[in-house]
Image (cartoon, coloured by chain):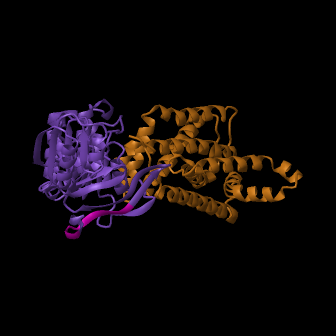
Chain colours: A purple, B orange
Amino acid sequence: MAWEVIEPSLVRARSVSKRYGRALALDRLTLSLPEGSVLGLLGPNGAGKTTFLRLVMGFLFPDEGEVDRGGLAPGQIGYLPERALYPSRLRVREYLELIGRLAGLHGQALRDKVRRLLAELSLEDAAGKRLGSCSRGMLQRVGLAQVLLGDPQLLLLDEPMLGLDPSGQKLMRDQIEILHKGGKTILLSSHNLGDVARVCTHVAMLNRGRLTRSGRLDTLLPGRAEVTISTGPLPPGLPSAIRSLAPGILASEGHIKLVGDAVQRKTEVLRLLLGADVDIQELVEAHATLEEAYLEATQG
Amino acid sequence: MSRLWTLTLYLVRELFGALAGIVPLAAAVAFGLIAFEYGMDQAQLITVGGLGIGTIGFLATLLLAGKADRAASFPILGRLRRRAELLGSILVGGLGITWILAIAIVVANLLAGRLTLSSPSLLWIMPTWTAVWLFVTALALSLSALVSRNGSNLLGYLLVVAVLVANDRKADLLDRGAGWAVRIVERLVWPVGTLLSRASAEVHDQTYFAAAAATLACAAALFLLAAFLFRDKDLLWSE
């Protein structure tokens, strides 16, 4: 990972493995979280994203390897859980004041901070509501508000857009951008590639507990061409023969896609197609998007 | 200190805002009615009250630990400097609930004329009960599912039950030639047993203070055991 060489890290995971019984959740994962970055963790369900966040939080401990939080003071992490399970009987304001006190705020400073956050996150009308009667979107905003209390150095957001309506998603994105500009380090997991592309500076893709791709977003995608070939019917066995040329080749009926390094095998693919007398209808070369990079990194 | 107090109030409020909060209250009412039915003097109060209300404190501590043992605690734990702060707040909460229920039971029975307190040595009840209940709440904490690892709490419960049964059947054990077991059990129950019996007899000598110190040392050891078990435990609370 090139960024490790030039950017100081707040958290560094070295060859971390984690098992739940026999299931391997993380497999020798090495990943660092550059200070001041917004790192998006991408991956399908069960890829190990939440496990990694909980390892960083110190809720879980690695079976092998280590998570170094050397640059981080204890209690200086704000955590937004994936599913907003909060104490249902507490009211929104009471809950925020509880977290604020634990974060070291007191008296007028605490009240002012809570009032400001309620206003910024459009929660003023909900301040007196019990958490158990709040909607999913409202709870997600309460979750973000509690994350921001006490000015933590590191924010861990597990699926922050989950369950939010479009305006809630925009609010969340805007807040993440504001926090990033304010110098905060953010680690977030998401299934929403559009959001990650918009707010993240770095991306790490996980699949079955392994890191399959990572890098700065601005260096991960440009220059990575993709080739899409539209064809007539493929004879049996040819799709698998094409796929076996390189890991980044997706071949299905009438549609072949070469992504990343697999683009270098374009000539061989065409040779195979022509050799099998397949009708080649169209060949399109384009730059890869985050979606393609994600699919490439998580399939296989 | 401020964080400990904040956490304690939060957990106590969570407990008494839930159905589970009825358990220590109902137990206190039942104990207050049944144990004092035929009246009680100060000597009986120190031993019976110490153990009976201590048992309610044990339950209350387990329930408080249960309130902390869930996914809603994730954001809270993220703000703590040490996980032991959460355990400390449970201990303080358990002890506080026990004392409040004890005062309610004692006052209610005094007003009902079923309890006689006369001696000036009444003041010795406070340090005596505090030491015993610190031990009891620390024991409950170390046996709670919150800190349990690989079924360590089940093993703990088995040991506690074994000690209590063996203490009750000492004569049988001696008849069967298990004098060694009797000696072990006597040593284990000595601090709390001696503390309560001396206080009950209004004897506050060196043995009383040695028993109090031993009880507090056991409480500290149990708290450290709980902190050790919880320190690097994987928290697998499901969201």
Residue A180 vs residue A136: left or right?
Answer: left
Residue B91 horizontal/vertical position (percent)? 50, 51
Q: Does B168 appear above or below A55?
A: above
Residue A101, visible in the rendered structure:
yes
Image location of residue A201, percent across then percent down: 17, 55
Quadrant that contains the N terminus of chain B:
bottom left
Residue visible at 63% across and 50% down? B156
A290 within the magenta span: no
Image spot of residue B151 (x, y percent): 58, 48
In percent of width and height, residue A260 lies at 20, 53
Where residue A219 sits, quadrant-wise, is: bottom left
Residue drawn 45% across and 41% down?
B67
Snapshot quadrant of residue B41: top right
**Left or right placement of residue A109 versus residue A102 in this view:** left
Q: Nearer the viewer, residue B14 or B78?
A: B78
Q: Residue shown at 33%/32% (left/top)?
A: A132
> The C terminus of chain B appears in which quarter of the rendering?
top left
Tally of numbered discs: 0
In this rendering, the answer to whether B224 lies above or below A208 is below
Q: Which residues are magenta?
A: A5-15
Q: Can residue A202 be seen in this snapshot? A: no
| Of B42 and B63, the residue lying toward us | B63
State left or right for residue B69 relative to residue A256.
right
